[in-house]
Amino acid sequence: MTTERFLPLTSGSHTPSPSSSREVIVQGSGPALVLAHGAGGGVLGNYGLVLDELARDHTVIGPHYPGAGGTPESPRPLELDDLADLLVDSATAAGHDTFPVIGESLGCAVAVRAATRHPGRITALVLTAGFASPDPAQRLTAQLIQTLGRNGQLDTAARVACLACLSQTELSQLSETEIDARTAAARAGLLPALAHFDLVCRVDVHGDLPKINVPTLVVAPASDRMVLPASTRRMAHGISGAEYAELPGAGHLMNPADRADWLGLVRVFLARALDQEAM
């Protein structure tokens, strides 16, 4: 069972988040494993299918960015540094000094920035559907979602998000009723998370990639239409020694079968990274 709790933000030596509180999902026991979610969906949107499995042998810690889950919206534009600090603050507040980070989509840039802002804290990275900066197709999609959402056309914005996040195969197999259900689910939390898509358009961690010096696994869903696999490959090439894997047929939001394959890759990688750390 997932445990959700609110923790007060701690500013420490870095810039406080614009939010006065944050919702953090904490589940399991054992060494910490921090989750950085993507734009819009929150921790459960990205990791809900595997959260119980990840928590079987880790304390999984997943903070929600402002505008996601129960974390209030920010009164100002989101900044990557603030979200990176949010990851680290959430883990240290839960009593963990070092930890691997799993990032997905926008969460990959957050994880990368956390690793460079807080050297010594992050022991390994798993980056899925990541990008160092948005390619033109991704930028246009994020801008369209923002524009539609801010103009009150949330249903249309949600349909654009579904179109980009589901693979072509999945879309071809869905009935109109199923598409409507997916759209309704996407629409539910879209308005408060529009600031995430604004940040997507401004992300640039190219300068951070050469500074990463921890074991890194980069995974590309091969049928991703939100973050093109070529963008994820470029992120992998920018990190010295990074491992790279593709999930054939997987879209941006993975179905249960693709997520199970992803989990197998992640488990093998994390076990190997932990062995290297212990040497």
Image (spheres, helix red, strand yellow):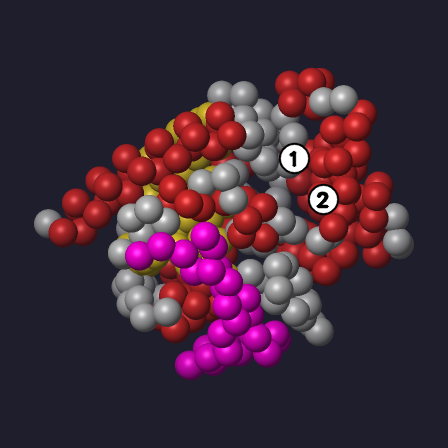
Write down the region rendered in magenta. 1-29
Q: Which of marks 1 and 2 is in front?
A: 2
Q: Residue at x 63, y 40 (%)?
A: 135
Mark 1, residue position: 165
- Front position in the image: 248 or 63: 63
Q: Is residue 95 above or below residue 137?
A: below
Mark 2, residue position: 186
- Provide the secondary structure element on which disc 2 rests: helix
Q: Residue at x 76, y 56 (%)?
A: 191
User: Is-magenta flag for residue 186?
Assistant: no
Q: In which quarter of the view is residue 87 placed?
A: bottom left
Q: Residues within 10 Å of mark 1 (few under 14, many from 20)?
A: many
Determine contact: label 1, label 2, CB under 8 Å: yes
Q: Where is residue 132 in the image (x, y as percent from the top left)?
A: 52, 47
Q: Which amino acid does label 2 sit on?
A: Ala
- Front position in the image: 1 or 201: 1
Q: Position of residue 206 (x, y in %)?
A: 48, 50
